[in-house]
Amino acid sequence: MSAIASLFGNDYDADGFRTCSVTGLDVHRSVENHVKLYGLTAVIALAFGGIFAFTVAMTRWEFIGLLDPSQFYTHLSAHAWNLLIFWMVFMEIAILYVGGPMVLGKRLPIRRVATAGWVVMAIGAIGVNASIWLTETPNEAPLLTAYVPLPVSPWFYGAAIVFLLGATIAALPFFVTIWNATRGKRRTLPLVAFGAFITSIIAVEAILGGIAAFAYAFAWRVDLIASVDPGIYRQLYWIVGHGTQQINLLAMITVWYFLTHVVGGAVVVSEKVSRTAFVMYLFFINLGAAHHLLVDPGVSAGWRIWNTSYAFYGAAFASMIHAFAIPAGIEAGRRRRGQGSGLFGWLTSAPWRNPVFASTVFSIILFGFLGGITGVVMGQIQVNMTWHNTFAAVGHFHATVVLGTTLAFMGLVFFVIKTMFRRDLISNTLALLVPYGYAGAMSIVTLMMMYAGILYGVPRRTAEVVRNIPGSEFSFSAAVPIFMVFGVFALLAILGGALFIVVSVASLLFGDRIEDGDDAGLLPEGGLHADGGESIHAIELRGTFTLCLVFLATFIAIYVLNWYLVTQLWGIGA
């Protein structure tokens, strides 16, 4: 217990503040300790969910065939809830506290509320896990969606509501901070705080949808109402089911701006443009949930077309702005410091041996090329037919939530270990294996998922997929080579995730103490605010422009290919 208590101790002045030797921010004890609390809990959820990543992957890889179908759904549910929800949301509350009171140099207001929020969230998370693991016939494992009229345990719905209420409580200190910082003042929030604020608004939308959906189902399961309309439930559910992933997106982008600046020397090329992109998310990002409903009979064709084209493009355009602004910020910042010449010297000279920087930039690249492009493609009403309920959809959200958000959050955890826990990483070499090994292996895994779904129609939620479908002559055996590659690289990716846990925990327990004033090797050459005196707008961003052209060409190629594959569907049954 003393070892754990020591993790929450730093040297503060009489008012409870200390100056961070990396960011230069004045950090209050209350903020730092709650960021640590939520961050540690998130890592525990990641470790627990990672166990089920192994069992699920080794079941889908029928060469191993680890679990039978009755066990598979329980493990799949535990995997989804711990990694898609608990790991993410606990981290995102920590990010709100960083983006709010820490960036603004304030105390954490209503600290007891922040602690109470953690307690309620933890109770809800434990309750969800218990209800999943203890589910018995005739109840069904809830999966992430917990669709009605499947008889999911009422304890699950109750625990999920508790967790969402806890997240609401935990976010209140952030809103109070923003209110106090802006009330009666004509000042603009720093970009990171602004991004966190937009994230919190999206979070409120998602949480309200989740409470409405789960309360509706809970009332049915405890016989307060006679029935539930599955169509209404699905529309309510996807407000939180997809909305939580939009929270992940905005939190991840906020982390990108923060970490590329601190460890990569990036600047913001145009704050107005970046802020505009965040605001556009408010109006359009949650409409992306529509692609989950494109085969539902309860919504009109006009509604589907509007949400998956005209309105959806608003969110896509906002993402394109960030996709240009962040690399442009890195290029402008590094060229301004005189680091890197030629077309890509600014990138090749970057601190690639810094695991925080590597995790962040790999997250940006892989999210864009594998997650962002596939999200826009599969969100189209026609192309969606080749993706819907296939393993390709699983590949897409592993590209977004794993290669994107999880990788960025891993970099943030390494950053917090050094700057808040003031512990050096136990081994920089092992830490570097996380972004390089984990990102590389998971990239292959997501591609194999997409190929299996798009090319062969492999379903997304069945324990057995390659063997013949019982009662028919239809077979997925042609997908066997893809699943062999999938299985091997899934093991490597899981080992990469396990290595992240080991390095993080070992660093906290055994890492050398970083003394005050030491930047822990995180800052870019010349320090955080070094520059060559040249105006940002006088710098040529030809490297970023070239990368954007490569991205556009890739997008067009994938888009055209998927439209071609749509034309091949009509040969079925001919």
Image: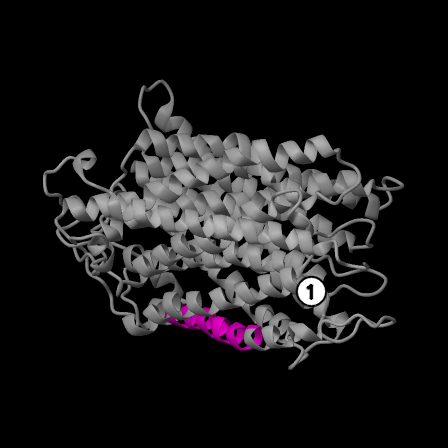
Image position, residue 72 (x, y; %): 71, 70
- In the rendered image, which quarter is residue 464 located in? bottom right
Judging by the rendered image, the residue that carries numbered circle 1 is 458
Q: Residue furthest right?
A: 226
For the residue pair 104 and 445, the one nearer the viewer reads as: 445
Q: Is residue 36 left or right of residue 229?
A: left
Q: Is residue 279 above or below residue 435?
A: above
Q: Is residue 158 left or right of residue 171?
A: right
Q: Is residue 219 magenta?
A: no
Residue at the spot x=51%, y=43% of the render? 247
Label 1's element? loop
Location of the C terminus by quadrant is bottom right
For the residue pair 312 and 492, the one nearer the viewer reads as: 312
Residue at the spot x=59%, y=78% of the render? 484
- In the rendered image, which quarter is residue 127 located in? bottom right
Location of the N terminus by quadrant is bottom left
